[in-house]
């Protein structure tokens, strides 16, 4: 029962804190009604016109004092206090907007996913092919798990023909040990090719099956031409989809989801993502940056408004009530001689 009520209680506490901060902020840039027109009696708020005894309540000015707009604003808080309160409100609003936005994006189907797969070539003609393909993808997905952006990595591990299993657990390990590899940008399909014995070669062309076929040949993969064609097409689908298609007999000649590989894969959900992604930033970082910039601008504008409001209140012309003459003190009776 406590677990069910805890989020509701937490939200109510946060709303109460936000309301209290908002009250403090409003008070710091407003004047009490009785002081809005100028100095007044500290007891009843009657306009001060120079009297020594208040005509309204009869209090002596030496006892109750005179309240002024500047004094009232000082009692209600300084600009520094207003800035601190405003910062807390903006921080609270920014975190709320950030969290609610991610929750909404998650419900709409936008997320971040990680895929890791080892593609083992299916034995053909009783001989095990001499390579293994390791694929990793960290991608942003949209509705229906459609890939939107991210990076995909293909590493080719050359192994003896009799090898029963790959030596490398994943693509990152294969790359770290010098295996030839390709990095693919899933947003525009531009790729970077690197070999173990050369510096990375950057290409502005989009990755296609022909480029993958040449890459397999340069890596030393020992396959016939038809097998190279099938392997390159299957690897291209895997790189672009972020998922590995397990082997199955083709039902038709146009079945593009068949593969000559057996797949050992896994995937994990990394959390919600923003529909917008800035160049060089992840979708998660993009949403964080957008919220941060928006609420920093909001904080600056709100603080300027508070400062100008306080200055306007202090510079407003003072409207004084008509002077009320102080009644003369009664004369002392003359002593009779």
Image (cartoon, rainbow, N blue to C red):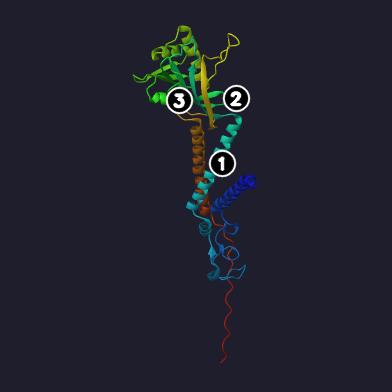
What residue appears at the point 55 percent right and 59 percent down from the top-left corner?
38
Q: Secondary structure at mark 1?
A: helix
Q: Nearer the viewer, residue 198 or 337?
A: 198
CA gap, disc 2 and disc 3: 27 Å
- Left or right, 173 with respect to 287, comes to left
Judging by the rendered image, the residue that carries numbered circle 2 is 144
Q: Count residues near mark 1 (Cα–Cα under 10 Å), then give few for <14, some for 14-19, many for 20+.
A: few
Q: Position of residue 170 (x, y in %)?
A: 45, 25
Q: Nearer the viewer, mark 1 or mark 3?
A: 3
Coordinates of residue 63 in the picture (x, y in percent): 54, 70
- Few, some or many residues within 10 Å of mark 2 (<14, 14–19, 20+): few
> Which label lies toward us, 2 or 3?
3
Q: Is residue 170 visible?
A: yes
- Nearer the observer, disc 1 or disc 2? 2
Pick whichever of labels 2 and 3 is earlier in the sequence. Answer: 2
- Residue at the extreme right: 1
On the image, numbered disc 1 is attached to which residue? 96
Residue receiving disc 3: 170
Which residue lies most toward the top here? 225
| Residue 159, position as x, y percentages in the image | 41, 17
């Amino acid at each position: 029962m406590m677990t069910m009520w805890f989020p509701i209680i937490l939200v109510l506490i946060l709303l109460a804190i936000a309301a209290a901060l908002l009250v403090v902020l409003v008070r710091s840039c407003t004047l009490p009604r009785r002081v809005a027109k100028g100095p007044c009696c500290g007891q009843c708020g009657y306009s001060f016109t120079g009297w020594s005894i208040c005509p309204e309540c009869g209090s002596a000015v030496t006892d109750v004092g005179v309240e002024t707009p500047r004094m009232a604003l000082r009692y209600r808080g300084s600009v520094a206090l207003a800035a601190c309160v405003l910062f807390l409100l903006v921080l609270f609003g920014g975190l709320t907007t950030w969290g609610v936005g991610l929750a909404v994006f998650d419900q709409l189907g936008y997320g971040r996913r990680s895929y890791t797969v080892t593609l083992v070539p299916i034995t053909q003609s009783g001989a095990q092919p001499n390579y293994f393909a390791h694929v990793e993808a960290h991608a942003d997905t949209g509705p229906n798990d459609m890939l939107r952006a991210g990076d995909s990595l293909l590493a080719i591990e050359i192994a003896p023909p009799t090898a029963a299993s790959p030596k490398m657990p994943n693509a990152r390990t294969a790359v770290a040990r010098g295996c030839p590899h390709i990095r693919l940008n899933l947003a525009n399909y531009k790729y970077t090719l690197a070999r173990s014995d050369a510096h990375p070669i950057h290409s502005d062309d989009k990755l296609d099956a022909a480029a993958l076929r040449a890459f397999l040949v340069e890596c030393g993969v020992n396959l016939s031409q038809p097998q190279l064609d099938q392997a390159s097409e299957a690897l291209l689908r895997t790189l672009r989809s972020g998922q590995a298609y397990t082997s199955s007999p083709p039902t038709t000649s146009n079945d593009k989801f068949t593969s000559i590989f057996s797949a050992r894969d896994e995937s994990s959900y990394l959390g919600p993502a923003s529909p917008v992604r800035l160049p060089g930033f992840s979708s998660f970082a993009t949403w964080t940056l957008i919220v941060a910039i928006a609420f920093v601008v909001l904080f600056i504008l709100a603080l300027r408004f508070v400062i100008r409001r306080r200055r306007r209140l202090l510079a407003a012309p003072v409207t004084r009530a008509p002077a009320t003459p102080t009644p003369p003190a009664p004369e002392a009776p003359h002593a009779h001689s």
